[in-house]
Image: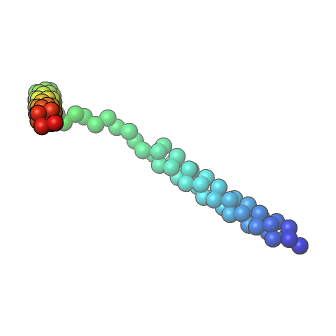
Amino acid sequence: MGTLGCIHDMMRRDKENRELRQRSRERMRETRRRMTECQHKEIPPTLSVEKLEEIKRQIQEKEQADRKQALQITLYVGLIALLLLLLLGIFS
């Protein structure tokens, strides 16, 4: 009689899995239907060539400023570390 519970549990899980597979198929069909109905149209660009060039120039300026700032921070940290090493060398 002990295996009867296992069999019942297995049958219940099979039933649940069948229902889950059916719902998954329905969702897949719905997704496929929505994707085939979707009309992919080319969106015309709203930015002019001059505006795009201005944006590129601004990006380049920002990158240069970021690199300059990173270099300054590295130099400051290096100088502070060097001063600390010198101070520790003098007092030891």
Q: Quadrant of residue 58?
A: top left
Q: Residue at x 47, y 49 (%)?
A: 34
Tell me the quadrant of the picture where the N terminus can be found: bottom right
- Relative side of 29 to 87, left or right: right
Residue 50, how many percent across, how many down?
Answer: 10, 27
Tell me the quadrant of the picture where the C terminus can be found: top left
- Relative side of 58 to 35, left or right: left
* Residue that sits furthest to the bottom in the current view: 1
Q: Quadrant of residue 71?
A: top left
Q: Quadrant of residue 89?
A: top left
Q: Which of 70 and 2 lies nearest the eye of the viewer? A: 70
* Residue that sits furthest to the right in the current view: 1
Residue 6, how many percent across, how many down?
Answer: 80, 66
Q: Residue at x 25, y 34 (%)?
A: 44
72 shown above or below 5: above
- Relative side of 87 to 29, left or right: left
Residue 77, how many percent across, how many down?
Answer: 14, 35
53 shown above or below 26: above
Q: Is residue 91 visible?
A: yes
